[in-house]
Image (cartoon, helix red, strand yellow):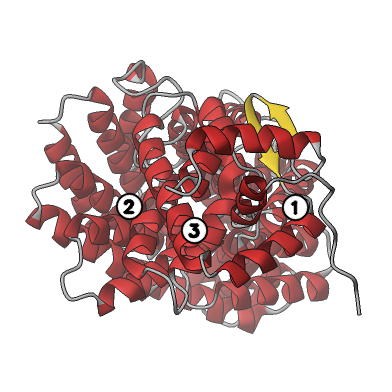
Amino acid sequence: MKPEPELPPRVAEPECILLRRLAIFAGPFSLDAAGAVATNPELARSEVIGGITNLVAKSLVVAEVEGTARYRLLDTTRAYAAEKLSESGEREGIARCHAAYYRDLFERAEVEWEVRSTAEWIGEYGWRIDNLRAALDWAFSVDGDAALGVELTAAAVPLWMLLSLVDECRGRVERALTALDAETNPHPRREMQLHAAMGEALTYTRGATPEYEAAWTKALEMAERLDDAEYQLRSLWGLWSFYLTSGRHRVALEMAQRFRALAADRPDPEDRLFGERMIGVAQHHLGDQHSARRHLEEVSTHHGPTSHRPDVIRFQTDFRRFQIGFRVSARAFLARVLWFQGFSDQAVRSAEMTVAEAARTGHALSLYLALGMAACPIALLVGDLVAAEHYVGMLLEYSTRHALPNWRAYGRCYQGVLVMRRGDLRSGAGLLRAGFAELGEAESAVLRLVKLLATETLGQAGQIADGLSAIEEAIEHSERVDERWLTAEMLRIRGELLLLQGGLTAAGAAEDHFRQALDLARGQGALSWELRAAMSLAGLLRDQGRSADAKTCLQPVYDRFTEGFDTADLKKAKLLLDSF
């Protein structure tokens, strides 16, 4: 049997009491925390402070000076002290004081994170997370206090999100909401905050699922009932994100317009800019690239200092976070719009800047947005497989490190397309299937882009039936939800697949598809899709011996480009023109 550790000689009785009470701390603690938890009529606060100094001198407590003075017990000492705490019969009372202290601490932190820099705020509160976890474990235990746990969970949401511990946040919030359901008179504001936190956590861990929509819908209902404009805006943002992800872009546009209308009466001009960004992103997916660029550039032009602290924004990655996150989001979608409009070089530079800017913050969620929404798809669209490999590798590495399965699944999907583009169809298809399986029911606009990129490769690899089946499904979905940003390319790919399939009517049907794609892309201001449609049509006309018509079709489209001549599409177009 392992012998108990012995206390050094001359440990006074008050110090023994203090030592066993300090065992409640899981990890480092401050003098203030020790005083709040260990002080009672039996042990004065001055005795706590003096006692800790004595325990440090006797090597029973370790002092760590890193900004705020911190103290901790060694594992063996803590195990012994915890046993004595249980024997004393005061564990429950000390655990309650411990949980109440951290609830009060994080409620103060909620207020401070709007006025302190992110780095400073994390430096002050990030190291306390082990005690937060221990307090919550006790609060939701059989002998705990669930109401206290609910309050602490709601107050601590910013810490989990700022540390990118999104899955842990979701689990803790889910537990708190379950406890709220059992309460007779739950606190409505805390309930609203928890539903909003659940909605955001699901944004990054599960994607567009029914639970995601339900969380934001409940948060909006409660915010309207409480006449809380701040949480109405947050909830409208969450629902906008849900409808955007699930492909219901008309509804997403309605949410964005409601957001901007509500923001017009708010004192912070940043609110209106968020509305502009939301409208721009919805218009991008609806296929109106001119309007999308106008709204997104409105954000870039007028984005400046606000009433919030310099590095914090709202309605992106838990709403009051990095101002950089706002720029990341707007710039990521603007990069896509630039590619659509034929400005490939600008799109690539914008994506690179977005990734670099997000990486500098050290905030994982902003980086996933930059990689998954801009850098990975743009690298594949311009045909830069080396850059695509680099960005996909980053996405997989960071999403694995921070345990965000949704983004890891996107990384697998991008990796699958990349591997297929390099000629290994079997391995690429396996990666795609794995990514789709991880995403499960979750849908997103960018996932549909991934599927489109993969479908074209299937046709080129000879799996025409599979390609046609996939593209038919994609076109049907596009028409059902009015998602138009990919429709021109879908029509073009369907025409190419029909040509590959062959048959008496194949050429005529393909030409019809190419011309529809050409007209639609031109009407949307999507010059890059227009070029691809023009190349497909020109290639068909050339093969029919109609080289003059082919050149008349392609040359004017090619001549409208002012950059991007080293990209795969423009190189291919130049070769095709030279062949005439």
Tell me which corner region of the image, top left, top right, bottom left or bottom right, holds residue 184.
bottom left
Disc 2 versus disc 1: nearer the observer? 1
Q: Nearer the viewer, residue 143 or 58?
A: 58
Q: Earlier in the sequence, mark 2 or mark 1?
A: 2
The disc placed on residue 419 is: none
Q: Amino acid at mark 3?
A: Ile
Q: Is residue 161 left or right of residue 433?
A: left
Q: For the point 19% across and 49% down, which residue is it?
A: 232
The secondary element bearing badge 2 is classed as helix
Q: Nearer the viewer, residue 157 or 288?
A: 157
Residue 394: percent from the left, percent from the top? 73, 47
Pointer 1 residue = 397
Q: For the point 51% across and 50% down, which residue is it?
A: 160
Q: Is residue 409 left or right of residue 206?
A: right
Pointer 2 residue = 286
Q: For the point 51% across and 79% down, which residue is it?
A: 505
488 to 357, vertically: above or below: below
Residue 256 visible from this viewpoint: yes
Q: Amino acid at mark 1?
A: Glu
* Disc 3 packing (10 Å; few <14; some 14–19; many ≥20): many
Residue 253 visible from this viewpoint: no
Residue 489: percent from the left, percent from the top? 50, 57
The disc placed on residue 94 is: 3
* Disc 2 packing (10 Å; few <14; some 14–19; many ≥20): many
Q: Earlier in the sequence, mark 2 or mark 3?
A: 3
Q: Are marks 2 and 3 in contact (CB under 8 Å)?
A: no
Q: Earlier in the sequence, mark 1 or mark 3?
A: 3
Residue 163: percent from the left, percent from the top? 57, 45
Tally of numbered tags: 3
Q: Are marks 1 and 3 in contact (CB under 8 Å)?
A: no
